[in-house]
Image: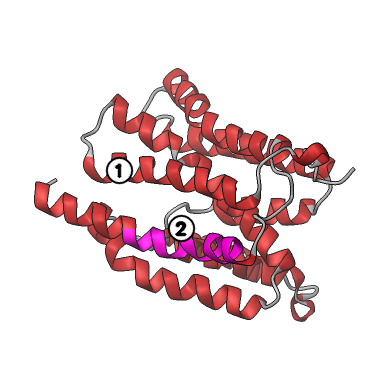
C-alpha cells in the first residue's frame, strides 16, 4: 500500500499546508520558551511545538529522497544554520546550536545511510552524527527519527511502524530524562505522556492527512520551499528583540 492514503478524491493536506501548521506550532513553542516564566502555560506552549520536530524530520527525509541536488539541499541547511545562530541565542540564551544545524546533521546521517562510500562502515560515523546532535536543539532523537522515516520509504504500513517507534522512543526519552531529576517516577510518566500528545498528533497527520502532494503552481511551491528558511531566523530575531526590550 502506498503512503498516499488520503489522496483519493483530492482530500488531505499538501506538504506545504502541513509545514505551515508545524511553523505555527513552532512559533507557539518559541514564544513560550523565550518570553514566558516557568509554569503550566509555558509548558503547554512548549509541548505544542513538539509537533514541529516530527514534521520537519519527516519532510527532511522526503526532501532527501526527491531533491534534484542533495549537495544544494545540505548546503542550504548549513547556511541557514549559521544565519539563525545569533537570533537563536538572542531568543533563548541557550549555549547550543539551533535546529537548522540539527537538520543538517539529520541530512548527514541520510548521506551516510545512502552513500556507497560508507558501505560496511556506517555505524561509527552514524553514531558520531547522533552524538554531535547533543550540541544542538532537538538532540539525539531528531537524527534517529529522520532515519526511521527515510527507511520507511513511501509504504504506508512501514510509515505506520516508523511513527509507532517515534512516539515510543519519545516517551522513553522524556521519561528517562526527567525521572529522578525533575520529577518522581509517576510524575515523569505523566509528563512524558502529556508531552507526547503533539508528536503523536504529528504522526497521525502524516499517516492520515498527508496526501503526498505539493501545492499546485510553481510560485506556490517556491514560496513554500523558502518561507520556512526565512521565517525561522526572522521570528527568532523578533522574539530576541522583544526579550531584550522586556528584560526577560
All told, the count of numbered labels is 2
Quarter of image, res 85: bottom left
Compared to residue 66, the image places residue 164 above or below, namely above
- Residue 12: x, y in percent? 70, 39
Q: CA distance from mark 1 to mark 2?
A: 23 Å
Between residue 51 and residue 223, name the one nearer to us. Answer: 223
**Is 73 contained in the magenta span?**
no
Determine whether 81 is above or below 220 in the image. below
User: Mark 1 or mark 2: which comes first in sequence?
Assistant: 1
Q: Is residue 177 or residue 69 the one in the foreground? A: 69
Element assignment for label 2: helix
At x 63% / y 66%, what residue is drawn?
218
Residue 50 horizontal side relative to residue 110, left or right: left
Residue 1: in sight, yes or no?
A: yes
Residue highlighted by disc 1? 31
Q: Is residue 132 above or below residue 27?
A: below
Residue 95: tell me if it is visible. Answer: no
For label 1, the crowd category at 10 Å Cα-Cα, with few meaning under 14, some 14 to 19 and many 20 or more, is many
> In front here: 11 or 77?
11
Which numbered dot is residue 134? 2
**Mark 1 vs 2: CB contact within 8 A:** no
Which residue is at a point 70% across and 51% down the rendered structure image? 148
Q: Magenta region: which residues? A: 219-234
> Which image quadrant is residue 84 in?
bottom left
Q: Quadrant of the N terminus?
A: top right
Quarter of the figure with the C terminus: top left
Residue shown at 37% from the left, 34% from the top: 45
Residue 235 lies left or right of residue 59; in this view the side is left
- Residues packed near mark 2 inside 10 Å, few (<14), some (14 to 19) or many (20 plus): some
- Foreground disc of the pair 1, 2: 1
Write down the quadrant of residue 210 in the picture. Answer: top right
Measuring from the top left, give residue 144's x and y in whole percent: 63, 53
Amino acid at each position: 500500500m502506498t503512503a498516499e492514503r488520503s489522496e483519493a478524491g483530492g482530500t488531505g493536506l499538501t506538504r506545504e499546508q502541513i509545514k505551515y501548521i508545524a511553523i505555527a506550532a513552532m512559533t507557539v513553542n518559541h514564544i513560550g520558551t523565550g518570553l514566558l516564566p516557568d509554569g503550566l502555560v509555558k509548558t503547554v506552549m512548549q509541548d505544542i511545538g513538539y509537533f514541529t520536530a516530527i514534521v520537519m524530520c519527516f519532510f527532511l527525509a522526503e526532501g532527501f529522497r526527491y531533491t534534484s541536488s542533495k549537495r544544494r539541499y545540505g548546503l542550504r541547511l548549513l547556511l541557514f544554520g549559521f544565519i539563525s545562530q545569533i537570533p537563536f541565542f538572542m531568543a533563548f540564551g541557550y549555549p547550543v546550536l539551533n535546529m537548522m544545524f540539527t537538520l543538517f546533521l539529520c541530512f548527514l546521517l541520510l548521506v551516510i545511510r545512502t552513500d556507497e562510500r560508507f558501505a560496511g562502515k556506517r555505524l561509527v560515523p552514524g553514531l558520531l552524527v547522533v552524538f554531535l546532535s547533543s550540541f544542538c536543539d532537538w538532540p539525539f532523537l531528531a537524527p534517529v527519527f529522520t532515519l526511521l522515516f527515510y527507511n520507511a520509504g513511501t509504504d504506508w504500513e512501514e510509515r505506520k511502524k516508523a511513527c509507532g517507534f517515534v512516539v515510543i522512543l519519545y516517551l522513553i526519552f522524556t521519561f528517562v530524562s526527567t525521572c529522578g531529576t525533575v520529577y518522581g517516577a509517576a510524575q515523569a510518566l505523566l509528563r512524558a505522556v502529556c508531552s507526547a500528545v503533539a508528536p503523536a498528533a504529528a504522526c497521525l497527520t502524516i499517516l492520515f492527512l498527508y496526501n503526498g502532494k505539493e501545492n499546485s503552481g510553481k510560485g506556490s511551491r517556491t514560496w513554500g520551499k523558502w518561507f520556512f528558511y526565512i521565517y525561522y531566523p526572522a521570528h527568532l530575531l523578533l522574539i530576541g528583540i522583544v526579550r531584550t526590550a522586556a528584560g526577560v
